[in-house]
Image (tube, rainbow, N blue to C red):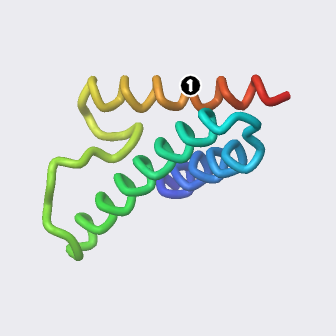
Amino acid sequence: MLLLGGFFILGRLVSIIENASSPAGRAYVSGFFLTLLVQTFVHVGMNLGLLPITGVPFPLVSAGGSSLLATFIGLAIAFGARKRLK
C-alpha cells in the first residue's frame, strides 16, 4: 500500500509535467519527480538487498524532520504550479 501511494504521487507529478505551460514550472516539477523516484527506488533496492544500505530516506515515511519538511515543501510548490495551470 505504501508503494502504491508513492507511485500515485509520482503519477500526479507526471501529469503536472505534461500539462505545464511554463518551462520553469516543468523543469522544477521534473527535477522534484526525479528526486522522489530515485529515493523510492534506492530505498526499495536497499530493502530487497539489491543495493547497499545508505542514508536515503523513504519520501513521506522515514523519520527525520528535515527530509519530511523538504518533501512537503516540494510537493506544495509542485501542486501550486498545477493550480496556476487552470
User: Dot 1: within a 10 Å radius of its alpha carbon, few (fewer than 14), some, or many (20 or more) residues?
Assistant: some
In terms of depth relative to the viewer, which is nearer, 15 or 45? 15
Horizontally, residue 40 falls left or right of residue 29, namely left
Left or right side of 29 for 15: right
Q: Position of residue 38 (x, y in %)?
A: 37, 57
Relative height, residue 45 to residue 25 (above, below): below
Percent from the top left, x then y, of residue 32? 47, 42
What residue is at 52 percent from the left and 55 percent from the top?
1
Above or below, 75 relative to 48: above
Q: Give how far across and how far down residue 26 sits, in percent.
A: 62, 41
Left or right of 51? Residue 4 is right
- Spot the residue most to the bottom: 50
> Quick one: which residue is furthest to the front in this view?
23
Residue 30 or 64: which is nearer the viewer?
Answer: 30
**Secondary structure type for disc 1:** helix
Callout 1 amino acid: Ile
Q: Is residue 16 above or below residue 86?
A: below
| Residue at 37% in and 27% down | 70
Residue beneath the point at 73% across and 50% down: 18
Residue at x 53%, y 31% (from the top left corner): 75
Query: Which residue is tagged 1?
Result: 77
Going by the picture, which residue comes out furthest to the right?
86
